[in-house]
Amino acid sequence: MTAGTAPRWDSALASVTVYAQGALCRRVARGTVPADGQVRVPGLPRSLDPHSLRARVLGAPGTRVTEARAEIHAEPVDEDAVAEARREVDRLTEAYHSADARRDRQVKRIEEVGALRPVPPGRKREDPHRRTPVDAWLELADFVDERLTVLHDGLRELDDELRRLEHEMDVAQDRLARASTDAPASGVASSYTAVLTVRGGAGAEAEVEIEYGVPGAVWVPAYRLTHRQGEDSGRLLLRASVAQRSGEDWTGVRIAFATADLRRRTDLPRLRSVRIGRSQPAPAPSGWREPPAGLSDLFAGYDAAGPPPEPDVVAARAAGLVAGGSGEDASVTVGAAYGAPPTPPPPPPAPSAMPAPGAAYGAPAQGFGPAAPGSAPAPDRSRPRSRPGSGPRPAAAPRAGGGAYAPAPESAAAAPHAPSPPVPGPPRPDDAELDYTALVLSGPDESRDRRGLLFPDAGFDPVTAEYRRRAERPAALPLPGHAVRPRESAGSFDHRYDAAAPADIPSDGTWHTVTVGEIAVGLRTEYVCVPAVEQTVYATLVLSNATDQALLAGPVEVSVDGEYQLTAALPTLAPGGVRRLGLGPAEAVGVTRRTHLTESTAGLRNNVTVLDHRVHVELANRLPAAVRVEVRERVPVTSEADVRIEERAGWTEPEDTAERERHAPGTRIWRVDLPAGGTVALDGGYEIRIPAGKALTGGNRRS
């Protein structure tokens, strides 16, 4: 069965995992397994990484996927889809303008009916005064009221229709914009097709999951916090701002978010043993073999034909042959028909000799004279390419026939340098040379040391590069306010967050908000003031993480008692961690601070100056609920043994070591419970005893 007749299985995007940069998409395809097992699954985005393609069979133990590769499939762009989207936009635009005109007419009718007023008939000067009947006034008022009720109901329906048409028109315009942007200028759309080989279960229904990676998708966390005063719990909603331009819309998919790096290495390093002595372990086979003898004979006929002519030369000669008919003009040799004189066949190559010892592994002969003429040239190890721990190795390419490798050609610039001592063992191809699906057979137009051999494809595909460049653009988007990239806030740990419901994320390269789920947190409201600096009480939320996952840094929208307060920056909160989140000044809680300083002397000779500082703080609670206020004061700190500081207050030092390190030295704390509508007075102070020899003459000791 050829590729054109292989059955095609339709697939649907099932789930997406967005990492710090990049995403893993999983598609599910269903169908009947053919006899030969060849299946094609089209519709994969062009921006995917072909090396990340994976496939497995779900729910069938005896059936498995033995091969999976990605092929590019091109087809003409469906112009009808773009034209249909444009016609839909035109239709909705016309319907919107028509509904808007009807609404304007309805508003004018309401204004006309509302302007109805009773007008008394005109009377002459000699006519007596007439009383207007009240029933006529009431009947007119009833008519106006009934008519306005009907007209306002119609206006309400027109407003609803106008909003609906406006929404549909915006959606249609967005669909048209994305369809026009995604359509290639060349008129040909291309996508990847997964070519699978399924073994086992021929003729049975199978379900295959296809996984592939796309670059450029990014996400940042965001939060919404709702809290009611007086309660010890709240509702923290985790949201994610996502942007992607992979070329396919993620519609109705299960989505998850991870902080890990999708491109990091996952293979473990191998620690090789170091042995001293002549007995060394045999080198591991590297898959390299010498090219077959007589490889140049395959291109003898091509070389004898000469270089290929230009297209205009071929056309001119073909026209001359047709016009000349027969005779001398028609008797042209094969070589002359291609624009070159006939070339005699090259002499036969010299018979190849048996390879010298060690040449079978790509190493030159040692101690047995020069290498045989038919053996492969010794690799130059003066410019090795190696990985850590693998030692130097020359560049190599696999043979076209059976996966054999040949050493890479040496440049002319390296000829004058003396080669370093050879390392025994076969060459070690790198990962690019072992990727057999990406190897390309060099044609006869290549250099003689490359033709007929397999080398990694170094060609540049501008179409693929443009798709990759477009997919990488969301990584350069400016972040929302207070947002932090998850790789920076996660630190040395990685976390994963699964969204509770399917989500829709279009491939437009802009930020979209997705609700991930609710997180259980502990909350309590505390009020803090530092009256020595500012006589203002600040409200704070003490947030504790009660889950087993970290809360990443990001913006949080805070609502208290159903009213939006502010958007603040939430720091990274580890499992079990506690952070304080400021809500701003609390105007309903007042604070007043007064100080008094008394200076005196003490001692037998009055040689000690005593500075008595007294602090008086008053707190007033005008809230309907009791609050807990933390008042912070500061006492002087001295490093002189002769200077003593004696405290006279009920304040305390910070409790634990972490809190003590967070505050400045000498910080003292009052914690007071204020009832609703109550006031509290706090008195404190300290004395500073300074010997006469330590006193500062003319200084300001009150500060």
Image: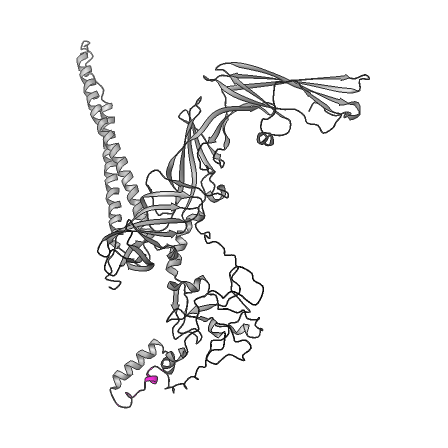
Image spot of residue 220 (x, y percent)? 43, 41
**Quadrant in the picture for residue 510:** top left
Q: Identify whether 267 is placed above or below 253.
A: below
Q: Is residue 431 visible?
A: yes
Looking at the image, residue 88 sits to the left or right of residue 467; the answer is left
| Number of numbered tags placed on the structure image | 0
User: Residue reaching furthest right?
Assistant: 605
Q: Residue at x 40, y 55 (%)?
A: 468
Is the residue 672 above or below the residue 404 in the image?
above
* Relative side of 565 to 312, left or right: right
Residue 214 shown in magenta: no
Colour scheme used in the picture?
one colour
- Mark yes or no: residue 189 visible: no
Left or right of 238? Residue 539 is right
Q: Main secondary structure of the magenta part?
A: loop
Residue 334 highlighted magenta (yes or no): yes
Q: Nearer the viewer, residue 143 or 310?
A: 310
> Which quadrant does the C terminus fall into?
top right
Near-viewer residue (296 or 597): 296
Expressed as whole percent of the image width and height from the top left, the position of residue 413 reads 54, 72
Residue 330 at what x, y percent from top left? 28, 87
**Considering the image in quadrants, where does the N terminus appear?**
bottom left
In the rendering, at what x and y percent does residue 184 appear? Answer: 33, 56
Q: Magenta residues, as a range? A: 325-339
Q: Is residue 176 above or below residue 202?
A: above
